[in-house]
Amino acid sequence: MLEDKFGRRFHYLRLSITDVCNFRCQYCLPDGYQCNSSREFLTLDEIKQITHAFAALGTSKIRITGGEPALRKDLPQIIQQCANTPGIEQVAITTNGYKLKQDLPAWLDAGISAINVSVDSLDPRQFDNITGFGRLQHILDGIEMAIEAGIKVKLNAVMLKQFNADQLQPFLNWIQSRNVTLRLIELMQTGDNQLFFKQNHISGLPIKQQLLESGWSQIIRNKTAGPAQEFHHPDYQGKIGLIMPYSKDFCASCNRLRISATGKLHLCLFAEQGLDLRELMQEGKQHALQDELVALLGNKQATHWLDKGFTGATSNLAMLGG
């Protein structure tokens, strides 16, 4: 079992397979993707080695992230590889949804078990303003297909003071009749968005209080759940999750590690550097890879220090998929 010196156990791997994204989100890549780093992304065989190593150490959930993972043509094969790894019980993906409608059948056939889609606004004009992509309805149609298929679906919405701060009610109306989870995410400061962060950060704590006063009840998280505090209401089919990285003790329940698209272990989204594992992602080196993972975990810190303005090596969220 992967366990750090603070007693936290890591059942959850976030696996980035590309840092390329075709959206221009205001809080992440407002100028679009810039090809200024290696694009020698993990191969299918390297993904096999790293997922088997993590699974052997107790990991049971893998989330495939980007950039935008659907930009890789071999995404169905990657999903299948992860789903067929002994010990892996859940394979999820986080996507901007632009290929969801087209590719969902292939993802389902490959063994995907959960999908998170980034939808920062249900207003088409505001969605276009935030993301630089003017096809909100196309994405919502893909989400409806996923719901109808019976797969677990979550909507990710980054809370932005200047863009969507007044749109909680439309989101609530939308989830009232849909079995989905809306996750409201506090904007996080990165190396490239410091001014934007100061202008747009909203704390999730007042929203949490508003939910509790409106009859929502908090749900107990399971061991592989992400960082969201989730809430349910008897009058709603959907749920709400709040991701509040600036809240007290946010890191105490950390259960996830990250592998970058170029094979580096990130002990935290805001770690000072990635730790290169690619040399060990080869046939016959799995035990050495496992030993290295256990050894490197000893360097994991108690907190991300975001509240002190620390952003580490994370220049933008597309680097590791959040």
Image (tube, helix red, strand yellow):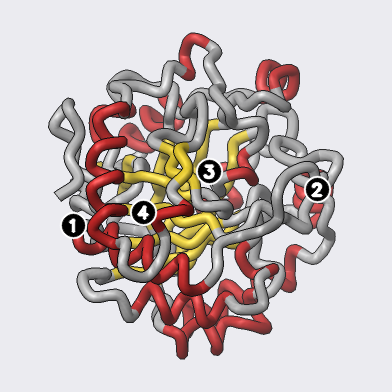
Tell me the kind of residue under disc 2. Answer: Cys
* CA neighbours of label 1 inside 10 A, class few (<14), some (14 to 19), many (20+): some
Mark 4 sits on what residue?
A: 13
Amino acid at pointer 1 = Gly
> Marks 4/2: CA distance?
25 Å
> Residue 283 lies in what quarter of the image?
bottom left
Q: Can you identify the residue that label 1 sits on? A: 58
The residue shown at (54%, 23%) is 312
- Side of 152 relative to 172 (left or right): left
Kind of element beneath mark 2: loop
Instruction: Using the image, tell me which numbered label, if any, was put on residue 322.
Output: 3
Q: Is residue 131 left or right of residue 2?
A: right
Q: Are marks 1 and 4 in contact (CB under 8 Å)?
A: no
Tell me the element at label 1.
loop
Instruction: Please give the residue where the numbered disc 2 appears in the rendered image.
Output: 35
Q: Earlier in the sequence, mark 1 or mark 2?
A: 2
Other-residue count near label 2 (Cα within 10 Å), few / some / many at <14 / 14–19 / ≥20:
few
Residue 125 is at least partly visible in this image: no
